[in-house]
Image: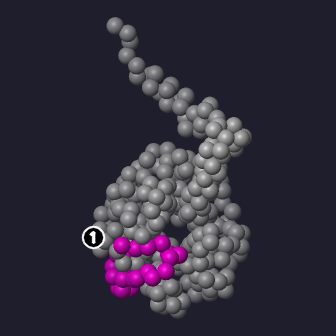
Amino acid sequence: MNLAPTGAGSSLRRLLAAPEILVAPGCYDALTALLIEEAGFSAAYLSGASIAYARLGRPDVGLVGMDEVAATLAAIRERITIPLIVDADTGFGNALNVMRVVKLFERLGASAIQIEDQITPKRCGHLDDKRLVPSGEMEGKIKAALDARASEAMLIIARTDAIAVEGFEAALERAARYHEAGADVLFVEAPASVEDMRVIVERLGPDIPLMANMVEGGKTPALGAETLQEIGFSLVIFPGGTVRAVAKNLRGYFASLREHGTTGPLRQSMLDFAELQELIGTADMLAVGKRYEGAED
């Protein structure tokens, strides 16, 4: 597993071409992204679903807009240097919207932008009753994204949700067409078995990096990075695992606080005040500010 820290200038394309699978945990704000980088991961994944969960307290059904993702991306990029893969849903509209999204997100520091072939508004890839745009429309969006980017170092990831809507074979056909349209990475969402995952790699690889999505309790079997690497995937994201872990632990924290009236029973599982200040760089920031203080009159 590729966990060595890298700078933003390092090529995500190079990381995807390495023999080791690239593991990208999900984040939804600057603090979770900072913790991913601190843990030593080589990339992070900005999850639109997790923004909906954490910021809105709502499901992933197309409620998060471009500006909300952009603001989150800007805050994260200010705090981390590792490559950041950004979930742009459907591109928030047609090909013209996709071009605007790509130009904006690239300027804000996205290393890759993922777009999918659902209609707008979309829904989580592991929910039922999804609907798709025609494959030709998605191909146009991919081409628009490629034309809009300033550098080929910023990758375009094409996702298809066709397995649940049109069937497995149709999903593979769509993915192959998206490859021909110029996508840098392919993402066939929600395969239901390990055998299907192997077929995806056999039919679509090895000419293009393939991405796997691990959703705890979702439609795809939960596999470890080493197994996914053996199957042939180049990238695996754990997009919602972070917010699910946070939600469960906070549920326990609040229950304990309500019962005991103190955080004492959970202190060993918390950062104390000084530890949190160290994590977020308080001393360094205050030192920088002190350099710009004016002399007293």
* Percent x, y of residue 259: 65, 44
Tell whether 107 sits left or right of 155: left
**Residue 226 appears in the picture as rendered:** yes
Q: Is 85 located above or below residue 207 in the figure?
A: above
Where is the C terminus found, in terms of image quarters?
Answer: top left
Q: Residue at x 37, y 56 (%)?
A: 68
- Name the image colouring: one colour
- Count of numbered circles in the view: 1
* Percent x, y of residue 140: 33, 79
What is the magenta range?
Answer: 121-145
The residue that mark 1 highlights is: 96
Q: Residue at x 67, y 82 (%)?
A: 194
Where is the N terminus found, in terms of image quarters?
Answer: bottom right
Q: Is 75 located above or below residue 272 in the figure?
A: below
In the current view of this chain or complex, which residue is farthest to the top? 297
* Percent x, y of residue 45: 52, 60
Residue 137 counted in the magenta span: yes
